[in-house]
Image (cartoon, rainbow, N blue to C red):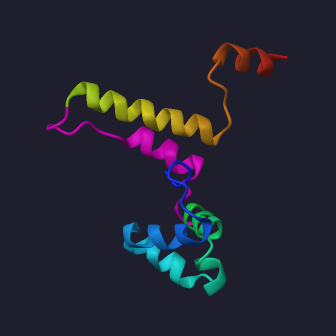
């Protein structure tokens, strides 16, 4: 969106701050003042703080249960999303046959 609307680099960090959740605001507050005003540094610090590990994603996938209020389509979508995030975190290519062949060689 910033590129689309040609938002200057020096305003990006300031514009995003009101939309951060409480934990992200704490992460930004702990940054050095010069880094907190730099959008790229701010973004990297927030992403580093909220990064999920492959083991967390696998555990989440294995323990996810269907709520009585959700449809099977929604539940299946959640499972597929978690599986895709897990595969991405492990750098597993979507072509499973290629991965199996590489593992066997």
Q: Is residue 3 above or below residue 79?
A: below
Q: Residue at x 78, y 22 (%)?
A: 103
Identify which residue is drawn at 52% across, 76% down. 27
**In which quarter of the view is residue 95 placed?**
top right
Which quarter of the figure has residue 35?
bottom right
Percent x, y of residue 38: 63, 73
Q: Is residue 100 above or below residue 54?
A: above
Q: Residue 37 location, x and y as percent?
A: 59, 78
The one nearer the camera, 13 or 32, is 13
Task: Residue 61: name its quadrant.
Answer: top left
In x, y percent, where is residue 41? 65, 69
Residue 22 part of the magenta-drawn span: no
The residue furthest left is: 69
32 lies above or below 51: below
Magenta highlight on residue 61? yes
- Tally of numbered tags: 0
9 lies left or right of 15: right
Q: Quadrant of the C terminus?
A: top right
State which region is magenta. 49-70
Q: Above or below — where is 47 with respect to 57?
A: below
Point out the residue furthest to the bottom here: 33
Residue 6 visible in the picture:
yes
Res. 32 visible in picture: no
């Amino acid at each position: 969106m910033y590129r689309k609307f040609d938002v200057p680099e020096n305003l990006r960090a300031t514009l995003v701050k009101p939309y951060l959740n409480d934990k992200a605001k704490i992460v930004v507050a702990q940054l050095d003042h010069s880094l907190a005003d730099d959008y790229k540094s701010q973004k990297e610090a927030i992403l580093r703080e909220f990064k999920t590990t492959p083991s967390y994603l696998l555990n989440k996938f294995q323990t996810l249960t269907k709520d009585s209020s959700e449809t099977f389509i929604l539940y299946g979508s959640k499972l597929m999303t978690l599986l895709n995030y897990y595969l991405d975190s492990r750098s597993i290519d979507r072509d499973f046959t290629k991965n199996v062949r590489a593992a066997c060689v």
